[in-house]
Image: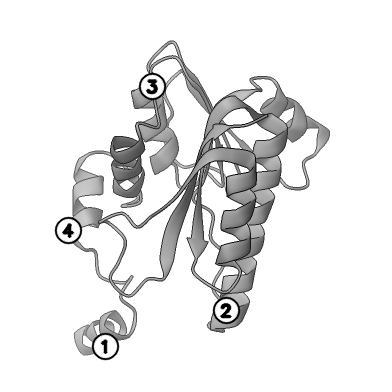
Amino acid sequence: MARARSGRHRDNPYARPDVFTQRAKAAGYPARSVFKLEEIDRRVRLLRAGMRVLDLGCAPGSWLLFVAKRIGPGGRARGVDLTPLEIALPPNAQSMVGDVFAPTTEVDAFVRELAPYDVVLSDMAPSTSGTRLSDQARSAELVARSLDVAERHLARGGSWVAKLFMSDEMPKLRARVRDLFETERVLRPEGTRAHSTEVFLVGEHKRR
């Protein structure tokens, strides 16, 4: 049995907890992705006390927890995901189960209540199929739709961050970000696994 598990670890780089996973658990976060947001925040000065932040695809909750700490008790954070969170959130953060891209009346009201937001975040990724081109296309679609949300709910001067699997769609997405924001960046945080093709697109200072 031990040999079989070891084999799966060799085939699947996500199966074995790495140093970032261990650090996240020790700090009380459910996933290592928190360190990606931490680095992005540090590099672009994304989050400040008192902000309103919307987290798209917020499960398992690491980004929402980090945001809540950074914006402090005077800030407000909301997250939406198809999967319910299994962690407790502080009073300045709330989550709701739903599809933010096809919202019910309840989800729409939940999101709109705090709009416009200072920051819109998306760490969403498609459930991988094993077909690279398909996964890349679905990732690009998620990024495009998160930009749609930012256009509707992000305040002028606000910022947006979204994860993307690099593909031929990337130049078009970057062009759209440049059209919507004064500053566009592509970041690859240190916590990204070596084999991964993911990057984070960042838009700063929404134009309108």
Mark nearer the N terminus (1 vs 2) = 1
Disc number lying in front (2 or 3):
3
In the image: residue 177, left or right of residue 39: right
Q: Nearer the viewer, residue 83 or 158?
A: 158
Q: In the drawing, what numbered circle is on residue 19?
A: 4
Residue type at mark 2 is Ser
The image quarter in which residue 174 lies: bottom right
Q: CA distance from mark 2 to mark 3?
A: 37 Å
Question: x, y percentage for residue 134?
Answer: 62, 78
- SS state under label 1: helix
Instruction: Answer few, some or many: residues within 10 Å of disc 2's Cα (few below 14, many 20 plus, some between 14 and 19).
Output: few
Instruction: Answer few, some or many: residues within 10 Å of disc 3's Cα (few below 14, many 20 plus, some between 14 and 19).
Output: some
- SS state under label 3: loop
Check the image and report above or below for 114 versus 105.
above
Instruction: Answer few, some or many: residues within 10 Å of disc 4's Cα (few below 14, many 20 plus, some between 14 and 19).
Output: few
The structure residue drawn at horizontal position 19% and vertical position 44%, both measured from the top left corner, is 26
Residue 30 visible, this orientation: no
Residue type at mark 4 is Val
The residue tagged 1 is: 7
The residue tagged 3 is: 48
Residue type at mark 3 is Arg
Q: Are marks 2 and 3 in contact (CB under 8 Å)?
A: no
The residue tagged 2 is: 129
